[in-house]
Amino acid sequence: MSDKMKNLVVRTLSGVVLLGVVLAAAFLGKYAYGALLLFILCAGLAEFYKLASAAGTEPQRDMGMITGFLPFCISFHIFEQLYEGYLVDDVLYALFAPSVILFVSLIFVVEVFRAKEHPLRNIAATLMGVIYIALPMSLMLFIPLMLGGGEWHPEAFLFYLFIVWGNDVFAYLVGVSIGRHRMCERISPKKSWEGFVGGIVGAMAMGALGNVVVGGGYVLWLGLAAIVAIGSVLGDLVESMFKREAGVKDSGNIIPGHGGILDRFDALLLSAPFAFVYLAILHACELI
């Protein structure tokens, strides 16, 4: 068997396993879903800090992990109560902001005693990991509930991912077929504006299907699809930018044939905050 064929087999098998993990996270309930996001958070932060180190900085790995982990735990507890249909204890909301502020402040203090070169860059890289990875994963806890009108629907989470995958597939097919105008050649030479438009069309097709399966209205799902598609492309470009500076092809090798966690889930990292704000606005306006 040729190396190319072996790589295809490995990539296919790991893709099947990854799909099984995602399905389990959706249908086994709140703890499985939370565990998946927490794994993405921890593994993603580890990969990000490795990229930052390769780019010449010395981030505070442990403090970054703790600073990202604590708000996620509080967010999960809030998510758990919403999942069960309970009113959320105000104390949980009161704990969220102080815990983040405390550990962000401690990052500055710790850097004083590390006596490392380039403290500004070290602190910035540490905080960037929390903002870039931990914050989106904390917000991602609530998006399926918001799509389901306050109730947990496994299909809501799956169709969020299907929108991301639909964008990727259609962007690739259109880009390969008729892509002529490069989108950001300095960072990603193969991306084209034609593929970008094709990806949005594919994402909106999946969004329309999501409305049929989950419900909520075409305005909700088509708007979400457009936002997620744009956020996914930007997320891919941002991760490519980081990898280019670090001088690596993949962010890691945890998923055989696919690279690292950031390589597979970079689309969630930038799309989740935009999607959360979009859904929050619709809820505030009582449109969903």
Image (tube, rainbow, N blue to C red):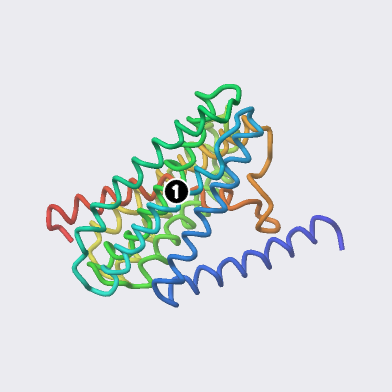
**How many numbered tags mark residues here?**
1
**Image quadrant in which the C terminus is located:** bottom left
Q: Position of residue 233 (x, y in %)?
A: 47, 43
Amino acid tagged 1? Gly
> Residue 128 or 162: which is nearer the viewer?
128
Q: Residue at x 73, y 63 (%)?
A: 10
**Image quadrant in which the N terminus is located:** bottom right
Q: Residue at x 27, y 62 (%)?
A: 146
Q: Position of residue 271 (x, y in %)?
A: 40, 48
279 relative to 36, above or below: above
**Residue denoted by label 1:** 68
Is 208 displayed left or right of 120 in the figure? left
Is 178 displayed left or right of 225 in the figure? right
61 relative to 224, above or below: above
> Residue 179 or 160: which is nearer the viewer?
160
Q: Residue at x 56, y 33 (%)?
A: 241
**Which of the 4 quarters of the picture holds residue 142?**
bottom left
Q: Please tell me whether mark 1 sits on a helix, a strand or a loop.
A: helix
Which residue is farthest left? 286
Q: Position of residue 13 (x, y in %)?
A: 68, 68
**Which of the 4 quarters of the picture holds residue 243?**
top right
